[in-house]
Amino acid sequence: MTNINLSKHIGKIAVGSGLIAASIYLLMIKITLAHIETVSGHVPFDMRPLGYDPTEGAALLEALGMEGRAYYLSHQIALDTVYPAMLAVTLIATICWFGQRMGNRKLARFGIAFSVGSALFDYIENLGIAAMIWNWPEVSVPLVYAASTATVLKSALTTLAVLLTLLVGFNWARFSEVDVRQ
């Protein structure tokens, strides 16, 4: 496969996975997470980038009730099982697509590592939320703190991965502009 064909292929992966990730994200924001917040009157675990403590976790789980907790598992966690992988693939493919022209690939490597880490901690967060729901009302304090820590790390790594992807794209545009002028 030539470099041009490889670049087109990576670009198609970036765009395709990006469309899937954006669609799932919109479904979660507009439907599942909005429903969870409406039912409980609390911000869902997934939307707390600074984390939560055992009291806040218990308040959300209690307010959800049995049906709300079942909905969290069957709808939100189900969607959030696909989303982290799609976001990571989107970011990694975009970084690879734009990063081809960069001489120093350190930025791209960090972006890829942060993207993978973001997905990993999103899955750990999901497992923690599911475990809290399955064990309700007997939720251990260490479990809540572990899930909360995963949420904070997911949020931080996602932010860093997106920022690095944008930086790689900016550098690509800058190098492309230089190439056009020459």
Image (tube, grey):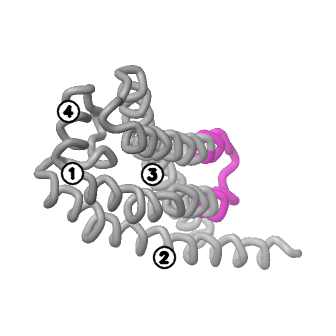
Under mark 1, the amino acid is Leu
- The prevailing secondary structure element of the residues shown in magenta is helix
- Left or right of 140, for residue 82: right
Q: Residue furthest top?
A: 142
Q: Do the residues bearing badges 3 and 4 touch, measured as CB atoms within 8 Å?
A: no
Cα distance between the residues tagged 1 and 3: 32 Å
- The location of residue 65, given as percent across then percent down, is 21, 51
Q: Nearer the viewer, residue 37 or 182?
A: 37
* Callout in the foreground (1, 2): 1
Asked whether residue 110 is drawn in magenta, I would say yes
Q: Which residue is mark 1?
A: 64
Is residue 101 on the magenta stretch? yes
For the question of whether residue 60 can be seen, the reply is yes
In contact (CB < 8 Å): disc 1 and disc 2: no
Name the quadrant containing residue 111.
Answer: top right
Q: Residues within 10 Å of mark 4 (few under 14, many from 20)?
A: some
- Region rendered in magenta: 94-112
| Residue holding disc 4 | 56
Which label sits in the foreground, 4 or 1? 1
Which numbered disc, 1 or 2, marks the residue that appears first in the sequence? 2
Give how far apart the Cα atoms at labels 4 and 1 are.
12 Å
Going by the image, does 99 lie left or right of 1?
left
Q: Secondary structure at mark 1?
A: helix
Instruction: Give the labeled residue for mark 2.
Output: 19
Disc 3 to disc 4, C-alpha distance: 28 Å
Mark 4 lies on a secondary structure that is helix
Residue 162, disc? 3
Q: Residue at x 27, y 70 (%)?
A: 31
User: Which badge, 3 or 4, comes first in the chain's sequence?
Assistant: 4
Report the mark closest to the observer, 3 or 4: 4
